[in-house]
């Protein structure tokens, strides 16, 4: 299964997002995915994880806004 297959849409920005996932996934880079609530940040993170060398390891999604300060 293509790791970018969950990234649906035909717009130029979605094509660029898929291109970036394919470009970054094979690296060991730290990636910050930012955006408004509901824009699909976790979907992009999952696609990135699925395309990476770590795809066989667990993906853990964390809602940073829900973490208590401290």
Image (spheres, rainbow, N blue to C red):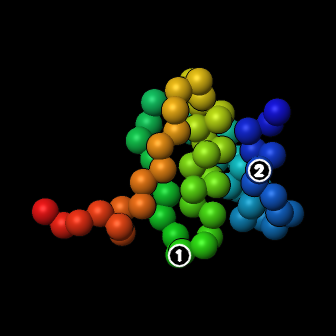
Dot 1 and dot 2 residues touching (CB under 8 Å): no
Disc 2 is placed on an element classified as: loop
User: Tag 2: Cα neighbours inside 10 Å, few (<14), some, or many (≥20)?
Assistant: few
- Residue 66, compared with residue 4, is above or below; it is below
Disc 1 is placed on an element classified as: loop
Q: What is the quadrant of residue 55 in the picture?
A: top right
Nearer-the-camera pick, 18 or 56? 56
On the image, the x and y values in percent for residue 17 come to 68, 55
Which image quadrant: the N terminus? top right
- Label 1 to label 2: alpha-carbon separation: 19 Å
- Residue 26, compared with residue 11, is above or below; it is above
On the image, the x and y values in percent for residue 67 come to 29, 63
On the question of residue 37 being in view, the answer is yes
Can you tell which mark lies on residue 6? 2
User: Tag 1: Cα neighbours inside 10 Å, few (<14), some, or many (≥20)?
Assistant: few
Residue identifier under label 1: 36
Pointer 1 or 2: first along the chain: 2
Can you tell which mark lies on residue 62? none
- Residue 18, compared with residue 63, is above or below; it is above
On the image, the x and y values in percent for residue 18 come to 72, 49
Nearer-the-camera pick, 3 or 24? 3
Q: Is residue 20 left or right of residue 12?
A: left
Q: What is the quadrant of residue 69 in the picture?
A: bottom left
Nearer-the-camera pick, 6 or 29? 6
Residue in the picture at 59% in, 24% down: 56
Residue in the picture at 13% in, 63% down: 70
Q: Is residue 31 left or right of residue 41?
A: left
Residue in the picture at 58% in, 38% down: 49
* Residue ranking furthest to the left: 70
On the image, the x and y values in percent for residue 6 come to 77, 50
């Amino acid at each position: 299964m293509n790791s970018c297959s969950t990234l649906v849409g035909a717009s130029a920005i979605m094509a660029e997002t898929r291109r970036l996932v394919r470009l970054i996934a094979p690296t060991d880079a730290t990636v910050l995915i930012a955006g408004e609530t509901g824009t699909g940040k976790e979907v992009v993170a999952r696609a990135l994880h699925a395309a990476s060398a770590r795809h066989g390891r667990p993906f853990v999604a964390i809602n940073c806004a829900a973490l208590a300060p401290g």
